[in-house]
Amino acid sequence: MPDVTTLMELGAPIAAIGGAAYARKAHPAAYWSTVGLPLSVVRLMASYGSTMDACGLTVEPSRLRALAVRATTRREVRPVPPRRGIPRPTSTGLRVRIRLAPGQEPADVAASSERLRHAWGVHAVHVVNLEPGVVELRLGFDVLCKVKMPRRTESDLLTVPVALREDATAFVRDYRAVPHQLVLGATLSGKSMFLRNLLTGLATQPVALVGIDCKRGVELAPFAPRLSALATDPAEAANLLPVLVKEMEDRYDLIKARQGIAQSAPDEVITSDVWGLPEGERPHPIVVFVDEVAELFLVATRKDEERRDEMVTQLIRLAQLGRAAGIYLEVCGQRFGAELGKGATMLRAQLTGRVCHRVNDEASAKMALGDIAPEAVGVASTIAAEVPGLAVAGDTSGGWIRIRTPYLSLADAAATCRETAELVPDVPALEPFRSHVPPPPVTLPVTLAKPRPANG
């Protein structure tokens, strides 16, 4: 009997530790709810003041408070931390509101987020500015280890939840807010998965999708039933891009015709882009996917060089003027920089959004993020090959965050495009470039009855 008691006393803690370690690896959400959340709350409540003091986030108390402390306790007056609200647990972490002290700004807290993360033993600490003087600390586990998209996400025209952010919210690709984007990533980095999720998300919307895939269409050809146009080599792209530019010019003529209305017309009917046109007159938006953009820049002869310069010029025109005409660019590649040739840097400057997956060298990360968020270059350069789909997303406002795309098989994506083929908008200018997709073969029913010969 004593042996059984001893075994239970030793085995129970070992089993609990082993179970916690397994849950932390295989089921992080369950581990966080049962173990990680209580420990984080205890650490935060017990060490909040000392941690803020060590991070330099405390301030001198007010004169009234200092006089009250001296009068009641006669002890030394110490700096005070920002006022903290009650920690609120969530399914993916912990949220705490902090009211900043006079003289502090959200950037001060954000600069200490890495030290706060280590002090409280969590995977990450994100600082969100809620209102003047109030920020929210979001603590949690690594939600990017096993991607699970939120149930409730934004859903609107030209708005696609395409990945999961590290603060457990959805990374939404909004073409109305960020018209053009550059997506970089090495082979097997998850760049194609990002493009696949984005394209299938747009496939269910009344949007014209145009593909330029100079790798003989190996990436975009499976989605041909839903594409309004597809170019699979530089020669076809050279014929397609002028048509897109002409379509853009025609839409500008439509906008100008709408502006030439009577002086007595109300202000709300005057517009400077297609979104101000009446719904019956508004042309369908067009999203152009350019996969492996470097193939458009590579040349072998002088004739190819002239064609390259013309295509790059047309891409730059689309990037500069396409937003008002409802034409948007999604440019993808492994590398993108000045070494590609004339016009490359100018084109990149027009691409507001940036997504950088794992790259083969730091120079590639600098191409994507160096001009908008230099501090994110180091983060993008350390993405491991074992986590495909992980990327750093930013825009020209200077903000950036880590994201990861959920897995979507090519068969499921292609099936979605076949099912939504009837949603292809009517854009007559693109009709000659639409790929002919043969109908699926008709499977005849198999009869089990044995045929009998006819009697003469």
Image (cartoon, rainbow, N blue to C red):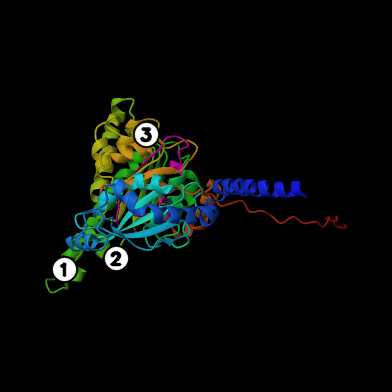
User: Which residue, given by chain and number where applicable, does mark 2 sit on?
Assistant: 281
Measured in 3D between alpha carbons, the distance from the residue under mark 2 to the one under mark 3, in whole angstroms, is 37 Å
Mark 2 element type: loop
Mark 3 element type: helix
Residue 183 percent location from the top left of the image: 37, 42
Q: Nearer the viewer, residue 447 or 205?
A: 205
Q: Is residue 171 magenta?
A: yes
User: Which amino acid does the dot numbered 1 rest on?
Assistant: Ile
**Do the numbered discs 1 and 2 sit on residues whose CB atoms are within 8 Å?**
no
Mark 1 element type: loop
Q: Quadrant of residue 456?
A: bottom right
Q: Is residue 61 magenta?
A: no
User: Which residue, given by chain and number where applicable, does mark 1 sit on?
Assistant: 261
Measured in 3D between alpha carbons, the distance from the residue under mark 1 to the one under mark 2, in whole angstroms, is 15 Å
Residue 110 percent location from the top left of the image: 30, 49
How many numbered tags mark residues here?
Answer: 3
Mark 2, residues whose alpha carbon is within 10 Å: few (<14), some, or many (≥20)? few
Rendered residue at 37%/38% (across/down): 380
User: Which residue, given by chain and number where applicable, does mark 3 sit on?
Assistant: 295
Mark 1, residues whose alpha carbon is within 10 Å: few (<14), some, or many (≥20)? few
User: Which amino acid does the dot numbered 3 rest on?
Assistant: Glu
